[in-house]
Image: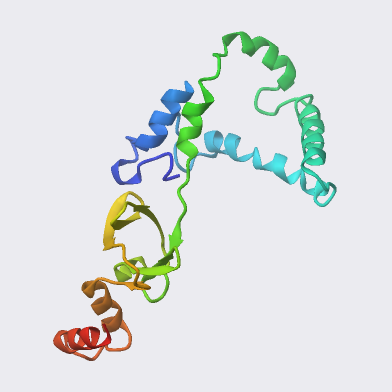
């Protein structure tokens, strides 16, 4: 997964861990161990956990409240952890008694939760704009269909794709905020694709 492995810097023999995930693992007190690609002997052990989810299917629509769902999960945990594990050939509860003395205390939860903060995202429309607080702001056409985040101060709105700054707009009372270069891109690709750049610029300033 790209959230775990930095694919741009990874080779078959040398795996580069995603930097943010690496920091998370350090704060969580754990070590990242990757599986060799196309090797079911190691990777399959992780993927077989999906079978447990399939066993929950019969409980679909069998609960009406979150508390009822919690009760189902607790009973399911009891059942699974009293079965002999195919991986260790032991009962998980019995194995846990042996292992728990080697476990470290959990790190402060506020440190771990800081990695799961998600900013609100805004989808770029076909007109290459995002809607923010009832107004529209342009971005380059290559971001059409993608989700962006924003930051705002008293005079400026900054728009980001992942962590890259892709556009800045002055905040005003206008409904539409666009950069000339963004407007030229969208018009060139659609309505005025056969027009020259100077003709498109004349059209933009006429509309403005």
Up-down relation of residue 205 to residue 172 (above or below): below
Q: Residue at x 55, y 19 (%)?
A: 106
- Image quadrant assignment for residue 143: bottom left
- Image quadrant assignment for residue 66: top right
As rendered, which of 88 and 127 lies closer to the eye? 127
x and y percentages locating residue 175 in the rendered image: 38, 73
x and y percentages locating residue 177 in the rendered image: 31, 71
* Residue ranking furthest to the right: 62
- Look at the image and name its color scheme: rainbow
As rendered, which of 79 and 113 lies closer to the eye? 113
Task: Name the image quarter holding the C terminus.
Answer: bottom left
x and y percentages locating residue 5 in the rendered image: 39, 40
x and y percentages locating residue 165 in the rendered image: 28, 54
* Residue ranking furthest to the left: 198
* Residue ranking furthest to the top: 101
Q: Residue at x 25, y 71 (%)?
A: 179
Up-down relation of residue 58 to residue 101 (above or below): below
């Amino acid at each position: 997964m790209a959230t775990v492995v930095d694919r741009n810097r990874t080779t078959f023999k040398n795996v580069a861990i995603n930097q943010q995930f690496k920091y998370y693992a350090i704060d969580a007190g754990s070590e990242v161990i990757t599986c060799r690609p196309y090797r079911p002997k190691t990777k399959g052990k992780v993927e077989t956990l999906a079978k447990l989810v399939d066993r929950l299917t019969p409980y679909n629509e069998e609960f009406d409240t979150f508390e009822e769902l919690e009760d189902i999960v607790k009973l399911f945990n009891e059942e699974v952890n009293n079965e002999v594990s195919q991986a260790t050939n032991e009962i998980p509860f019995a194995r846990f008694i042996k292992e728990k003395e080697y476990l470290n205390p959990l790190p402060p939860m506020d440190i771990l939760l800081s990695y799961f903060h998600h900013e609100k995202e805004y989808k770029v429309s076909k007109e290459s704009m995002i809607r923010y607080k009832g107004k529209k702001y342009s971005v380059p056409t290559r971001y059409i269909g993608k989700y962006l985040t924003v930051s705002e101060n008293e005079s400026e709105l900054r728009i980001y794709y992942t962590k890259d700054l892709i556009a800045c707009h002055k905040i005003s009372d206008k409904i539409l905020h666009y950069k000339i270069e963004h407007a030229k891109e969208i018009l060139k690709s659609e309505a005025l694709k056969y027009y020259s750049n100077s003709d498109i610029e004349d059209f933009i300033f006429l509309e403005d």
